[in-house]
Image (spheres, coloured by chain):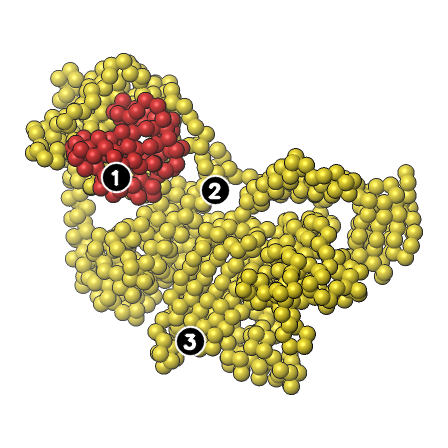
Chain colours: A red, B yellow
Amino acid sequence: MTMITLPAIMDRTSADALVSHLDRSMAPGVSVILEGSDVARIGLSGLQLMLSAQQTAQARSAMLEVHPSPAMISAARVAGLAEIFRWAQSA
Amino acid sequence: MTNEEIQGIFFLECEEALALAEEGLMACQSGTADGETVNSIFRAVHSIKGGAGAFSFTLLQAFTHKFETVLSYVRDGDLALGDRLTGLMLRAFDVLSDHVASVRGEGPSPDDEAVSAELEEVAERAAAGLPIEEMTSDDVGAASVTAAADEASADDFGLDFDLDDLMGELSLDAGEAAAMEAAAAEVERRLEDGEAVVAVASAPVTDVTDMSSLPISASLHGWHVALSFADGALANGNEPLLMLRELGELGGSCLSVDASALPSLDQLTVEKSWLSWEFALPASVTRAEIEDVFDFIGDDCTLKIEEMEALPGSGPVSVTLPAYPPVAAPAPAAVMASVPAPAPAPVIVQPAAEVKSAPVPVAPLKEAAEQIPVPASAPPPSSATVPATASSAPRPVSSVGQTVRVDLAKLDRLIDTVGELVIAQAMMAQRLGHNGAAVTDEMGMLDQLTREIQESAMSIRAQPIGSVFSRVPRIVRELESSTGKKVQLTMSGESTELDKTVVERLGEPLTHLIRNAVDHGIETPEQRIASGKPAEGQLHLSAEQRGGRILISITDDGAGINREVVLRKARERGLIAPDAQLTNEEIDNLIFAAGFSTAQQVSNISGRGVGMDVVRQNVKDLGGRISIESRPGEGCTFTLALPLTLAIADGMIVTVGDQTVVIPLTHVLESLRPEEKDIDGIGQDLMVLNNRGRFLPIVPLSNATGARGALTNPGEGVLIVVDTEGHGQAVLKDEVRSLVRVRRLNLLGVWPIKRQFDVVFCRNVMIYFDQPTREKLVARFADHLAPGGHLYIGHSERVSGPAQQRLELVGNTIYRKVEA
């Protein structure tokens, strides 16, 4: 199991730093937990990363579990993606 | 937001863009540039151009356009980066900086004629497929100055590229026209078929399809907005989510999202916007209001706003997800995982990534669908879901803006008040102490909180030193070209913060030191090679915080200070006695003497001897110190030690014999009562303290202050270890009395002090003022003294003016305020 704590600000810089880390973590059968409760601000870069991670995990048969913060849920709603993310109910 | 405020934001963005461009250009110069570097320079210049156009700064806009054209050729690989081109780009950057300064009202409009002509020339060459290296600098001069003479040769290749260019434009126009027609035809066909379909026209950057020509219903019930963001939008600092949020605030609801182009993690570039959206907005909103949301993003957003007959009911957002082939199994057949929006009808969405490569709208739908395999288990949107209206989303304050602009006067008032608070707190603690009250936990807490408030208030005024450092590369470039020396500049600690006033006043001394290092320190390439060094000199500029001070150092790897020459010059000019024996350090410090210069020839850069003494004075005025460390043949380091803030300084009151002295706490590392074993004698008078293995010279404070009856045996007194840029020094004094705080007060400005004073010491200050000012000051003192309070002035001063009625002389230079 891999647990990754998402940074407070999920902007281009931090999303960029996370891509390869997430990519390496997503192996078939591996369980990956993204702890997002610290995320106070998330931009489109961050949301795109979350969506790509979700779809990638599915394609690779990895198990992804995301615990979003209110800021993440709000951003997803703004972007019209609220129903698409299969995130855990509470942060 | 007023126009000025918006313009202010543009200027801030210009600063950021210039810094980015400069960073990129430095990489080009050092040979570490890649495709992305040039791209980032291009984006920076492009964003300045956009803003310049919006605010009608035509000169700036025209110049950025020429610069951008050349950059686009470099980016596309039509021009190879060489010394010549890099040099041109750097010069163009300098002119661009001047243009920006000019529109900000900080300087005259620069003369960009020569650089503009060269940029145009290079762009023409690139368009003609000619390499830039073939053109000598003589050619450029001739081309820009005597255009007529070059006409014949220009014609030689002019025909070729002009035609090609023209053909290119024509074919592009044809392609765009075809795209428009195809789009219009497709939409019309679907409309005839009874489908209320709206096509997303994705033009290559500019708006191609004018949808207003399409047949639409006269009854307007809302707007359909389709948008996607160009590749560079995020990199240019735009945040699409903020715009989507604003659409939500206008009453918009998201109809669909196309995420089909979003790559899997192994291919994901987060800097690109991979999604595109469709929103529905109510008719109560005007088209202009919608366009306003995207006002500042310009070409980075492809926006299509159309009228629609009916607003869709609230329903789930249709999202087209990307689907990646399962790792083990081959990809299944292609199906769009799109769920149609309930009303008015389905919407055609096109992958954002296709924008550039697919000038014909609508058509790529099929291609896109074919490329997308079915997702293994794309979650169907639940029917009982909350509509994705952004207006229903909570709106955290932080997302609106990360900064607040505050009038400096307001800020200073806050800092003054905090200063008062600090003093009041200290006075209370002192009074409690005098009355024998034990220091309670509450007092400790109050002290801690007061300090925190003080530090927070100070940090508001703090600015990163990078704003000063950012000017340095240009200074070095100019020096390189005027001296013929080669200099590699490196910087560190740009994010170190210090007081705004210090940052603002640091520019001048720093410029002097940089000029000095390049002009005097670093040798010519020939000299360097002869002494076995690389031809290119190194210059390092660094900033760091150490204790309560900021250390800024400028290090070069030049020849160092030639002490023989310095000593000879100093003797020649009578700065020192002919037989004076000086230590190396003392010799080095002679360069700070007024009127000192060792330069053989006075250049227009330095050598007039009006530099270093002014530098030292500037640094002193800021409450700082400057020191030199010279290594003959290896280089030289100048270190500036500056206070973090000028507003408040903590002090330690100590008693030395019959005197009381305040030592600024920023200099104090520690105070201790030494044990006998820690003290060693060296020679006749000197004593040193073994401070955890470091030997520090002990300097009796009475030597400096002339105090009588002071202790001489370090074992009996208290030693204070003070910081002098890395060299510690222990100061001996009798007793640490208490801590006081010392603040600056402008006697003629507005006094932040609200309370009345029991005593005012103002000795030998009034002598510097004229008579009316003295009288005014005396009146102020009288106003601020409590009845019966005392005023102490200097021996050569006297109390004058109307206020002397309120002050009675009670002793030599001592007055008492008459009881009311």
**Residue linked to disc 1:** A22
**Residue extending furthest toward the bottom:** B579
Return the x and y of residue B764 as percentages of the image width and height: 79, 59
Residue A55 showing in the rendered view: no
Apparent side of residue B388 relative to residue B261 in the rendered image (left or right): right
Label 1 vs label 2, nearer the camera: 1
Return the x and y of residue A91 as percentages of the image width and height: 36, 26
Label 2 vs label 3, nearer the camera: 3
Near-viewer residue (A9 or B172): A9
Tag 2: amino acid: Gly
Tag 1: amino acid: Leu
Q: CA distance from mark 2 to mark 3?
A: 43 Å
Image quadrant assignment for residue B146: bottom left
**Residue linked to disc 2:** B8
Image quadrant assignment for residue B579: bottom right
Near-viewer residue (B444 or A11): B444
Task: Compare marks 2 and 3 and give the one earlier in the sequence.
Answer: 2
Which structural element holds mark 1?
Answer: helix
Which structural element holds mark 2?
Answer: helix
Q: Quadrant of the C terminus of chain B?
A: top right
Q: CA distance from mark 1 to mark 2?
A: 39 Å
Residue B523 circle label: 3
Return the x and y of residue B461 as percentages of the image width and height: 56, 45
Apparent side of residue B474 relative to residue B352 in the rendered image (left or right): right
Q: Chain of mark 3?
A: B
Image quadrant assignment for residue A20: top left
Question: Pointer 1 and pointer 2: residues touching (CB < 8 Å)?
Answer: no
Classify mark 1: residues with Cα within 10 Å, few (<14), some (14-19) or many (20+).
many
Classify mark 2: residues with Cα within 10 Å, few (<14), some (14-19) or many (20+).
few
